[in-house]
Amino acid sequence: MTQLRIITPVADLLRRPDGPRDRQLLFGDTVTVSETQNHWSQVTADKDGYTGWVASDQLGAPVPDTHWITAPATHAYAQPDMKSPDRVSLSFGSRVQVLSDQGRFLETELGFIPAVHAKLNTTRLTDPVAVAELFLGTPYLWGGNSRFGLDCSGLVQAGLLACGLTCPGDSGDQERTLGDALPAGSAPKHGDLLFWKGHVAWVYDANMLLHANAYHMDVTFEPMDQAITRILEQGDGPVTAHKRL
């Protein structure tokens, strides 16, 4: 077993070598490598225990992170100057090691990141729904976990991990392990989760959901009654659980 880290902005976590994407990992995520064949490595993500295959060239030696990206996305610049060339884009949740503090910019191995876009790695946010709201308009992507594209369970996990709360990667596991089940007919409250077979949504308030969904193909608000009716009528069934964290 070898511990490595992701060294590309986003890495697809595949079901098998060169197979379909199940989830994604972000720059700085650490993984444990259990097997390597050809140019593929089987890894287990330290942040949630998810196992899959990544391209081996997306892995590098572990480096202790000092900060994480708390803006929806950011750029690393060639110089501590927003007019200098941007080298790479990073998503919310990416983890970096700061080499020096340049005031308005933080120097990292990738370049200079705006200081307002990162916080110390000990920082935890407080409202997972507010975190999810940062992703409004992000395109829907099956198995996606970044500002460049994500799905329903990726949106839920982004919010909870940012608040220091453990969260599995798939909606089925989230339904089984997160929060306490409420009786049918319970009044929804900000921060609750509604589950369907293969889908999950944040409750934003008593009448509104916030979710990544393939109908709108992005992260969006949707009236709760409208979503429940639409999902039922399109053949995906009724709400299977109402959970409170």
Image: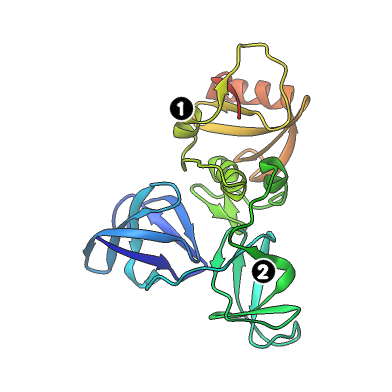
Of the pair 47 and 173, the residue shown nearer to us: 47
Q: Residue at x 46, y 61 (%)?
A: 29
How far is the residue under mark 1 from the one under mark 2? 34 Å
Residue 227 in which image quadrant:
top right
Looking at the image, is 214 positioned above or below residue 21?
above
Instruction: Identify the image quadrant of the C terminus.
Output: top right
Task: Give me the disc on residue 176.
Answer: 1
Q: Is residue 235 visible?
A: no
Q: Residue at x 63, y 33 (%)?
A: 201
73 left or right, relative to 32 = right
Residue 69 in which image quadrant:
bottom right
Instruction: Identify the image quadrant of the N terminus.
Output: bottom left
Sequence-earlier tag: 1 or 2: 2
Q: Position of residue 192 (x, y in %)?
A: 66, 29
Q: Residue at x 57, y 50 (%)?
A: 150
Mark 2 neighbour class, 10 Å CA radius: few under 14, some 14 to 19, many 20 or more: many
Q: Position of residue 190 (x, y in %)?
A: 73, 31
143 left or right, relative to 221 = left
Q: Is residue 98 visible?
A: yes
Name the amino acid, label 1. Arg
Q: Position of residue 241 (x, y in %)?
A: 56, 21
243 left or right, relative to 207 = left
Name the amino acid, label 2. Thr
140 left or right, relative to 65 = right
Task: Give me the disc on residue 74.
Answer: 2
Colour style of the rendered protein structure: rainbow
How many labels sit on residues?
Answer: 2
Where disc 1 sits, the SS reads helix
